[in-house]
Amino acid sequence: MAHELNIRIGQNSLRHKLLPEVLCWINPDMDTEHYEILFNSIEDGQYKVVLINKLTFEMTPIRASDAILLAQIAQLEIFMEERLFMRQSVPYESGKSKVALPLNALTSEMLEDALQRAIENENYELASNLRDELNRRKGNKNETV
């Protein structure tokens, strides 16, 4: 995804021949007047996203990464349900040197490192939560193979 976004940010002449750009070009209604992106929930650590036709209110499911790319290409607005925003947010405390993050915002590698530190510090409740999240992710990967 980073590669795809980098192509679009720079002055790459190839980008006008790529599939998302061509699809937006042949559908002139693919613009902010007709469509918007909505992040509406999270399930098994994955954001659920829909592309909404503002005129018909038709909602088409789309992968979160593809939604971000489409928004960049077609200059679409991106919205998030308030309840999802509140679920994913963490309180900010001025003067603190650490900030909490939702588990699904961390990579598996970061979770494994945190698990090792929790075990070393004998914080077994945190270790248990981290282990459960890692097992959930491994289970999801096995289902898609």
Image: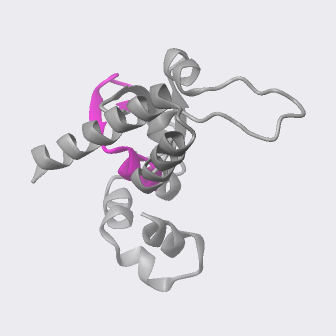
Provide residue 76's location: percent of width, then percent of height: 51, 44
Q: Nearer the viewer, residue 102 or 117?
A: 117
Q: Is residue 20 left or right of residue 115?
A: left
Q: Quadrant of residue 139?
A: top left
Span colored in magenta: 52-70
Q: Is residue 48 left or right of residue 104?
A: left
Provide residue 120's location: percent of width, then percent of height: 53, 45
Q: How many marks?
A: 0
- Residue 37 at least partly seen: no
Image vertical order of residue 85 relative to residue 110, above or below: above
Q: Nearer the viewer, residue 42 or 10?
A: 42
Q: Residue at x 33, y 42 (%)?
A: 134
The N terminus, quarter of image: bottom left
Residue that protrudes farthest toward the top in the picture: 83
Q: Nearer the viewer, residue 69 or 134?
A: 134
Provide residue 94's location: percent of width, then percent of height: 88, 30
In the image, residue 62 lies in the stretch drawn in magenta: yes
Q: Is residue 114 left or right of residue 70?
A: right
Q: Residue at x 43, y 69 (%)?
A: 4
Provide residue 128's location: percent of width, then percent of height: 39, 30
